[in-house]
Amino acid sequence: MVASRTPSVSSVRRALSIIEILAHAPNGMSVSGVSHKIGAPKSSTHTILLTLARCGFLEREHRTGNYTLGLKILTLGNLHIDKTDLRAQAQPYLNGLVERTGLTAHLAILDGDQLVYVDKIESPGMVKMNTWIGRRIDAHCTALGKALLANLPLDRLEDLYKRNALTQRTGKTISSRDALKREMQRIRFRRYAIDDEECGIGVRCVGSVVFDKEGRAAAAIGVSGTTAQIGKARLESLGILTRLCARKLSRNLGFAL
């Protein structure tokens, strides 16, 4: 007796179809538009879209209500593929930061209110940072995360923290929206961000944003170390150095400075 083929799950098939459809829709699509494309009722389409958005695979544009692909798609791609073009181009700069500073260097992207590390070069010394490729952490308490948040459109930033609370990881973590806005202004002015024991006691980080050829904040690059390695007097020089690295990497990615 020949066994019958295992049937596929229609909701999963529709979810994958939606991801593929939105990959070819740079401006996103409404619930009605997606519903028409996949030939499914609007109510069930909305449920699938909402589920994918809650899981980070899609994002909903606040102004238009359209759905677009979320950064988790890129995150998973970075974990699956040995090197993306961004990571490949960033490698010399990460290595250069480690050689010049003796600190750990990171490359990260933003996914909603979370920072995701996509590459890391360890420092040559005995001190190691508790980070790894693929680790997710609250963006508002990290230097790289704050550098990326500072370059979001203002309405996007406000919408992000209208729904998501500012988790306090240490006594120095930014805990109010007003304080976050003031910090964003400082970062835009000096073009680098600092984490002064805001994510973990005894750890400081410095980071700057990297732009793609469209002028969008694509990633952030920076260094991390202990408070003994990064004294407060060293923060400015490290900020200038990471800003320079980010500027050069942005130029390599096609951003016209």
Image (tube, rainbow, N blue to C red):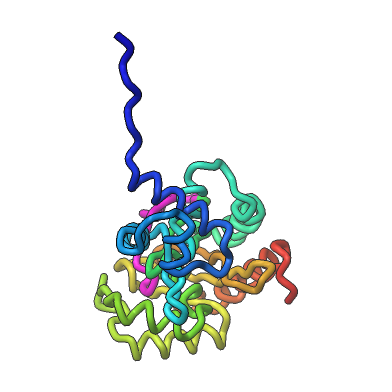
**Is residue 130 shown to the viewer in this render?**
yes
Identity of the residue drawn at 71% across and 70% down: 255
Q: Is residue 252 left or right of residue 211?
A: right
Q: Give the magenta part as a residue range.
A: 122-141
114, above or below 90, in the image: below
The quarter of the displayed image where residue 52 is located: bottom left
Residue 134 colored in magenta in the image: yes
Q: Of 88 and 163, which appears nearest the observer?
A: 163
The quadrant the C terminus occupies is bottom right
The quarter of the displayed image where residue 146 is located: bottom left
The number of callouts visible is 0
Name the dominant secondary structure of the magenta segment.
loop
The quadrant the N terminus occupies is top left
Q: Is residue 139 left or right of residue 108?
A: left
Point out residue 150 in the picture as x, y percentages from the top left corner: 49, 80
Identity of the residue drawn at 50% across and 54% down: 74
Identity of the residue drawn at 47% across and 50% down: 125
Residue 214 colored in magenta in the image: no
Point out residue 98 in the picture as x, y percentages from the top left corner: 57, 56
Q: Of 198 and 27, which appears nearest the observer?
A: 27
Identity of the residue drawn at 64% across and 50% down: 88
Point out residue 198 in the picture as x, y percentages from the top left corner: 33, 73
Q: Of 96 and 230, which appears nearest the observer?
A: 96
Q: Is residue 48 left or right of residue 152?
A: left
Q: Residue furthest top?
A: 1
**Is residue 70 shown to the viewer in this render?**
no
Q: Of 77 and 196, which appears nearest the observer?
A: 77
Point out residue 50 in the picture as x, y percentages from the top left corner: 33, 63
